[in-house]
Image (spheres, grey):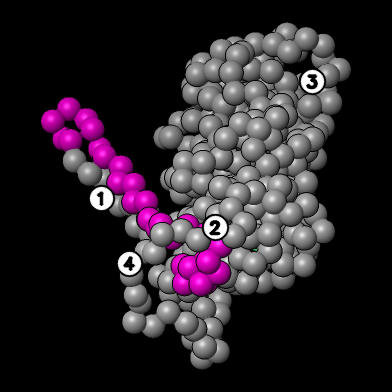
Amino acid sequence: MTERPRGPFRLGDRVQLTGPKGRLHTITLTERGELHTHHGVLRHDQLVGQPDGSVVANSGGHEYLALRPLLRDFVMSMPRGAAIVYPKDAAQIIAEADVFPGAVVVEAGVGSGALSLWLLRAMGSDGRLISFERRPEFAEVARANVETYLGEPPANWDVVVGDLVETLPQAVSPGTVDRVVLDMLAPWECIDVVADALTPGGVVLCYVATATQLSRVAEYLRNTGLFTDPEASETMVRGWHVEGLAVRPDHRMVAHTGFLLWARRLAPGAVPPEVKRRASKSSYGDEDVELWTPGAVGDRQITDKNLRKRVREAQRAAAGARRAAASDGDAGEPGASA
Ligand SMILES: C[S@@+](CC[C@H](N)C(=O)[O-])C[C@H]1O[C@@H](n2cnc3c(N)ncnc32)[C@H](O)[C@@H]1O
């Protein structure tokens, strides 16, 4: 993996520029690249060799603050096919699913690849991530986004196109996966294959948008008898405005994204001590399933036309990153001025 989060700017780096009136531009540094705005021209070579966090002026004398985007900046601005896992939830997923360096991790669906980037970072180059996605166009968006961010597709990442239920048993040997993260509409449909794939003590974590999904997957997990009693949480992050004596919560926040639910795989044949709890209704019929269709839970589906546009957008960005990385190789040592 070639994440390059520090050091002077080099050709191929993505740089976030904050210009006059706080206007943001994200560029990839290329050998003869230039940023043209109605305020003037900024040459990319003015940035190459400068430390991260520098201020440079364009031909019109207007100043720009240059910073490498953080992973959270990148995922929030990259092309999306499906809704992404927000950084606040990704951080919590890493913690609750206990994603560790060297872990073998399965995720489904890959969607736009936002969570894949966080998982790859947490498990490091000794880990292995296998991401499953049933819609080929979403898999393409995810591959392009990950390549744009890392400069190349990571060697320890496989994307399998297909439904997790059908493809997981062929992709991994039983009992060999350390962690499974499910971000999909109907995670309960995948629990049986996940139980087979997980190593004893391994963690399954589901990220769901609605309380009804949360309840259904919790009951499904319990009824298998193969997992510890599931735990659930939601994460609300409220920003604060801290300036002089004006110290208060921000007026706006992202109030709801989703819930996390996690449980651990028991050893074969293990029966945990009885857990005292009885739900009044813990099984679901066909009529309940209707409640979780995408329309019913208020999920807006991306149109085919829009999705094709996102695929082209993501692939253009990845091609730009590839060209820039190639011209970086031609230019010699990283950090050398162009
Ligand atoms: C909300 S998106 C995932 C977003 C992703 N975690 C991210 O951060 O970019 C849900 C994805 O799951 C996929 N999906 C749903 N059920 C699936 C299944 N059984 N097997 C594989 N993929 C599935 C959908 O096609 C969709 O792309």
Give yes or no for residue 35 being in the magenta stretch.
Answer: no
Disc 4 designates what residue?
Answer: 276
Q: Position of residue 115 (x, y in %)?
A: 59, 47
Q: How many marks?
A: 4
Crowding near the residue tagged with mark 1, few <14, some 14–19, many ≥20 C-alpha atoms within 10 Å:
few
- Region rendered in magenta: 218-247
Q: Position of residue 61 (x, y in %)?
A: 51, 19
Question: Answer yes or no: do the residues labelled 2 and 3 have beta carbons within 8 Å?
Answer: no
Residue 73: mark: none
Q: Left or right: where does residue 322 sit relative to residue 300? A: right
Disc 2 designates what residue?
Answer: 270
Q: Quadrant of residue 124?
A: top right
Q: Which of the two discs, 1 and 4, labels the residue nearer the N terminus?
A: 1
Residue depicted at 57% across the width and 26% down the height: 68
Q: CA distance from mark 1 to mark 4?
A: 42 Å
Residue 251: mark: 1
Q: Which of the two discs, 4 and 2, labels the residue nearer the N terminus?
A: 2
Residue depicted at 70% across the width and 30% down the height: 126
Q: CA distance from mark 4 to mark 2?
A: 18 Å
Q: Is label 4 or label 2 in front? A: 2
Q: CA distance from mark 2 to mark 3?
A: 55 Å
Residue that sits furthest to the bottom in the current view = 287
Q: Is label 3 or label 4 in front? A: 4
Residue 328: mark: 3
Three-letter amino acid code at the position of disc 2:
Ala
Residue depicted at 68% across the width and 42% down the height: 104
Q: CA distance from mark 1 to mark 2?
A: 50 Å
